Amino acid sequence: MILISGATGGIGGEVCRLLKAAGTPFRAMARKQEQVDAFARQGIDGVLGDFDRSETLAGAMQGCDTMFLITPPTPNQFAQETAAIDAAKRAGIGRIVKISASDGNVRSPVPWARTHALIDHHLRAAGIGWTILKPTAFMQNFLWFKDPIARGFLPQVTGTGSVSWVDTRDVARVAATVLTQDGHDSATYFLTGPETLDMKETAKRLSAAVGHKVRYLDLPTPLFRALLRLTGNSRWMAKGLVVQFADVVAGHHDIDPTFEIERLTGQAPHSFADFVRDHRESFARPGS
């Protein structure tokens, strides 16, 4: 039995969908009873579990031999994931497939990049089987800026820096694959999209896909931070994103495509054009 954490999120939810379609037994963990009830209505085995409440984990993990580990970036991420790893070992889970980050580094100024590196070290030393997936930045992050894009502007602070953006659907597809296959123990996979793009080229691709001109605006940092706050990001998240995009300017995210997604799953990853086409309505002009 596979335990899926983050089952109500984008990647975890897609992993659940893929496993259900394949007929693979799994259990979806959620923090709220109404979420567990919603899983039940979908014919999914749901269970209450909360990484902030360690007493809930033993019951959630009972009978599971594999766990998919993912948490959103927060100041509590290290405590949450290390507690989950330790609880999994106590519960007899034999392997953890963890979502990490391509820029994970214990010396990184990006808070979640540093945190992921520390959690990865903890997992490798925990005496439990592991597979670590390290995706680059997600294409779905552009949905944060869907309103300005719909009005013809792509606001960013990345200068001419490039990123090999990856679609979260492909990350989930890799996760579902390695969760159900042998041969991935002690493996670390860097997951990228099929190409690297700077923001000028990204704006050009958006323009072609949505049918109206989208212009890249390289904003001053204080203005971009304010925009992130207006789009619902916490002060901690906004500050971290500004630091991360400064890393893009420095070229730290310009990773050549690895082609691991196609190698592991047999399917090519989504291109940025695919992503925009599939989310075209989100970027369309109001009233169009």
Image (tube, rainbow, N blue to C red):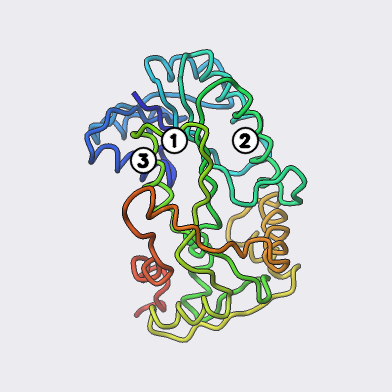
Quarter the N terminus occupies: top left
For mark 1, does the 10 Å Cα neighbourhood hold few (<14), some (14 to 19), or many (20 or more) residues? some
Judged left or right of residue 199, residue 206 is left
Q: Name the foreground residue: 132 vs 68.
A: 132
| Mark 2 burial class by Cα count in 10 Å: few <14, some 14-19, many 20+ | many
Residue occupying the point 28% across, 28% down: 25
**Pointers 1 and 2 in contact (CB under 8 A)?**
no
Q: Is residue 43 above or below residue 227?
A: above
Label annotation for residue 184: 1
User: First in sequence: mark 3 or mark 2?
Assistant: 2
Residue at 67 percent across and 47 percent down: it is: 113
For label 2, the residue is: 120
Mark 3 and 2 residues: CB-CB less than 8 Å, in contact? Answer: no
The image shows residue 138, relative to residue 155, as above or below, that is above
Q: Amino acid at mark 1?
A: His
- The residue beneath circle 3 is 176
User: How far separated are the C-alphas under marks 1 and 2?
Assistant: 16 Å
> Label 3 sits on what residue type?
Ala
Number of residue marks: 3
Are the residues flagged by discs 3 and 1 in contact, CB closer than 8 Å? no
Q: Which of the two discs, 3 and 1, sits closer to the camera?
A: 1
Mark 2: amino acid: Asp
Please report whichever mark, 3 or 1, sits nearer to the chain's N-terminal start.
3
Q: Between tags 1 and 2, which lies in front?
A: 1
Structural distance between the alpha carbons of marks 3 and 1: 12 Å
x and y percent of residue 253 in the render? 63, 61
Q: Secondary structure at mark 1?
A: loop
Residue placed most toward the observer, 203 or 181 = 181
**Where residue 278 sits: x, y (%)?**
34, 66
> Where does residue 242 sit, x and y in percent of width and height?
71, 61
Rendering quarter of residue 212: bottom left
Q: Position of residue 227 (x, y in %)?
A: 64, 66
